[in-house]
Amino acid sequence: MDEISYISEEKKKDLIKELENLKTVRRKEILEALDYAKSLGDLSENAEYHQAREDQGKLEDRINQIEYMLNSAVIIKKHKGDKIEIGTTVTVKKDGSKEETIYNIVGVEEADMAKNKISNRSPLGSALFGKAKGDVVSMNTPKGLVKYTIVAIQ
């Protein structure tokens, strides 16, 4: 059984926009590339044709993936509460550090470490999940055991 996927309303809008582009603009471009490649003759040794077919397969896979996500994902909203869950903004302090770091707990599709958006399935995200302010969580990293104290939950 598949695990539940979570996306924000913002990500849902982005996926709908991407899906529309793929179904209209990209499909048309690939069909034009296929028509051009077919006009070149022998398809068995036609690199343009094989590339266009491969692109078409990837496009249809992405369309199916987006449609599945939109139909099955749970839409999350910004969360306010005592426990960390998807939609929570959490402030943590790493043991031995004076700096605090703010993370947003998001679904897998939206994870982006550069923007401090961590997935609920990531090592840190799963360690924090369900915890409360003041709790200390530990996780193994390649550099050894690391502990984080939860400073704030928003």
Image: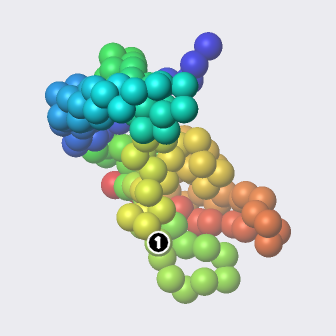
Colouring scheme applied when the structure was drawn: rainbow
| Residue that carries the numbered disc 1 in the rendered image | 101
Residue appearing at x 28%, y 40% in the figure: 11
Mark 1 surroundings: few (<14), some (14-19) or many (≥20) residues within 10 A? few
Direction from residue 59 to residue 149 in the image, left or right: right
Callout 1 amino acid: Thr
Residue at the limit of the structure toward the bottom, as seen here:
98
Q: What is the quadrant of the N terminus in the image?
A: top right
Asked if residue 87 shows in the view, the reply is yes
Q: Quarter-wise, where is residue 140 in the image? A: bottom right
Residue appearing at x 46%, y 25% in the figure: 42
Residue appearing at x 79%, y 72% in the figure: 143
Q: Secondary structure at mark 1?
A: strand
Asked if residue 131 shows in the view, the reply is no
Q: Which of 62 and 117 lies nearest the eye of the viewer?
A: 62
Q: Position of residue 154 (x, y in %)?
A: 34, 55
Q: Position of residue 121 (x, y in %)?
A: 58, 42
Direction from residue 19 to residue 41 in the image, left or right: right
- Give the number of marks: 1
Direction from residue 104 to residue 14 in the image, left or right: left
Please say if 48 is above or below 149.
above
Q: Quarter-wise, where is residue 15 in the image? A: top left
Q: Which of 18 and 127 lies nearest the eye of the viewer?
A: 18
Q: Position of residue 67 (x, y in %)?
A: 33, 21
Please say if 85 is above or below 67.
below
Please say if 141 is above or below 73.
below
Residue appearing at x 54%, y 32% in the figure: 45
Q: Quarter-wise, where is residue 134 in the image? A: bottom right
